[in-house]
Amino acid sequence: MKELDDAAAEGEDYLTRQQRALAEAVVAGAGERSFRLAAHLAAEGGVRRSDILAATALFLAYRAFRDGKAELVPGFLTRLREQDRDSVKLVRHLVRLEAARAKGWLPRAQYEELLSYAWREKRFDLVLRAGRIEPRAVEPVGGWAALEREHCPLLT
């Protein structure tokens, strides 16, 4: 497997390798390394620093939550709250959007919140992507929903 990764990496540019390293660090739950890679990627790759740090913090919080490492979650969510509020909102909506795209639907309340956000922020790309999602009259379920329920005050 390492040989395949090395061969794939040969054809990748520097930023793609940095993105891959960040994704691997987040999956591994490597908090400080993930934040260093995210900050570096923001500086090198033209990504808004607050956006990528917010995404990194949220994914690390989810990873810790999912893996039963509840003691780590508040620290990651504190790092999330340290970012620009617009970045935090964007990341939450992007996570919901991508989860919904994978399953084809989103709870109606979250769907309406997503569309309201997208129109208000003039993010027509999100409006178009949300148009392919079915709103359903159901309660949010799954790991992301559980994280939001248990740590909602820390997410905003």
Image (cartoon, rainbow, N blue to C red):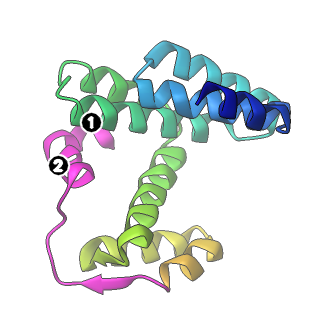
Of circles 1 and 2, the one toward us is 2
Which quadrant of the figure has residue 103? bottom left
Q: Where are the magenta residues, as a range? A: 132-156
For the point 75% across and 38% down, the residue is 8
**Can you say which quadrant of the picture contains the C terminus?**
top left
Nearest the camera: 56 or 12?
Answer: 12
Q: Which amino acid does label 2 sit on?
A: Ala
- The answer to whether residue 82 shows anywhere in this view is no
Judging by the rendered image, the residue that carries numbered circle 2 is 146
Q: Give the class, few, some or many, for how many residues have Cα within 10 Å of label 2's Cα (few <14, many ≥20).
A: some
Which quadrant of the figure has residue 80? top left
Q: Which amino acid does label 1 sit on?
A: Leu
For the point 50% across and 33% down, the residue is 56
Judging by the rendered image, the residue that carries numbered circle 1 is 154
Report x, y in % for residue 126.
57, 72
Q: Residue 80 carries which label?
A: none
Mark 1, secondary structure of its residue: helix
The answer to if 62 sits in the magenta stretch is no
**Mark 1 / mark 2, whichever is N-terminal:** 2
Q: Distance between the residues labelled 1 and 2?
A: 13 Å
For the point 26% across and 20% down, the residue is 72
Report x, y in % for residue 83.
51, 33
**Residue 135 placement, left or right of 29:** left
Report x, y in % for residue 75.
31, 20
Which quadrant of the figure has residue 109? bottom left
In this view, 62 is above or below 21 = below
**Residue 15 placement, left or right of 31:** right
- The answer to whether residue 67 shows anywhere in this view is yes
For the point 17% across and 25% down, the residue is 70
Report x, y in % for residue 52.
59, 37
